[in-house]
Amino acid sequence: MKISTEIGSASKIICEEKVVEYVAKAGFDAWDFSMFSMCKYDWGTNSLLENNHPLSSNNYLAFARRLKQIGLDNGIHCNQSHAPFPVYCKEIRDYLKRAIECTAEAGGKICVIHPDNYKSADENAEMYQELLPFAKQHNVKIATENMWCWDKTLDQSSFAACATPKSFCEHIDALNDDFMVACLDIGHAEMRGSDTTAVEMIKSLDYRLQALHIHDNDKWHDSHQIPFSMDIDFAPIIKALKVIGYNGYFTLEADKYLDAYNTENIFDGIKNLADSAKKLVEIYNNI
């Protein structure tokens, strides 16, 4: 079982090029291409802000190639990516094909594209159906992800697209295409109010499950912390993955964990993440 981690959180502290190098030196096998810098989104106005990041420029493919080469030079590769969101913003929807293109250029095989939280499986299928021919041309699978909304009255998560096993499977099956798969966000499935668990999700998704976002939380909020630091019990989750024969990567998305680090000690934080991912693999191997 190989391990990977997202590069978006560390890239807020040091440049992406250095992040990929550090991810390799920390002991990861692969890197997850976070592309949130492709679009700077204003949640208040539901529109994009001015952005001078290379992913937002005409040289976006050159940037993806540069990160790929840095990874290869350091003995790792890109396993998957994460497209910008929210997809209900039309301007961001216009960037989704670019995200798929960058995934292929970097060497990734799966691009995680959020569903619209507020739409049904059939409604979200329209967006994915539009993207699938382009994804196939680039030999990149699209993974949808289990989402959540927040109930302010109950102070807990509430239903959103793919939030339950039934909804998640419906989203995949509506496309009936080998290039449409599932990325299970372990933390989202373990939030209070989710009406499911990560184990239930894994059992239901079965062969559909080909990617993961792994992080820890207090089984209430979407904390995105390093595994084994909070309340999620990973042993039964790892066992369920082994039972269904999951053969993808253990990809961390503990992006809030690195908020406590700076340019002086960011490598230590990435190394801690790698050590936690290796512990997950150890559990997998000992089951």
Image: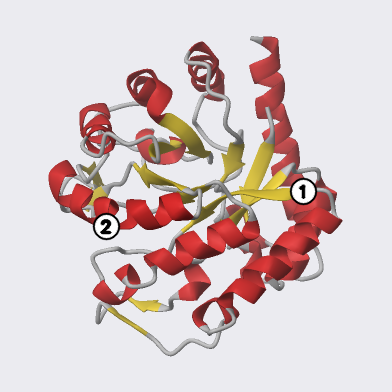
Q: Residue, x 48% and y 86% (percent of image)?
A: 51
Label 2 crowd bin: few (<14), some (14–19), many (20+), radius 10 Å: few
Q: Name the spot of residue 123 as percent of width and height, x first.
A: 14, 50
> In which quadrant of the rendered view does residue 29 lie?
top right
Q: Amino acid at mark 2?
A: Glu
Query: Do we see residue 266 in this rendering?
Result: no
Image location (x, y in percent) of residue 200? 34, 20
Mark positioned earlier in the residue sequence (1 or 2): 1
Q: Amino acid at mark 1?
A: Ile
* Left or right, residue 41 beside residue 62: left
Give the x, y percent position of residue 240.
48, 16
Above-or-below relation of 54 to 190: below
Nearer to the camera, 196 or 134: 134
145, above or below 245, in the image: below
Q: Which mark is residue 128?
A: none
Residue under label 2, please give it: 130
* Mark count: 2
**Side of 138 relative to 117 (left or right):** right
106 or 11: nearer the eye? 106
Residue tagged 1 = 76
Residue 278 or residue 37, whichever sits in front: 37
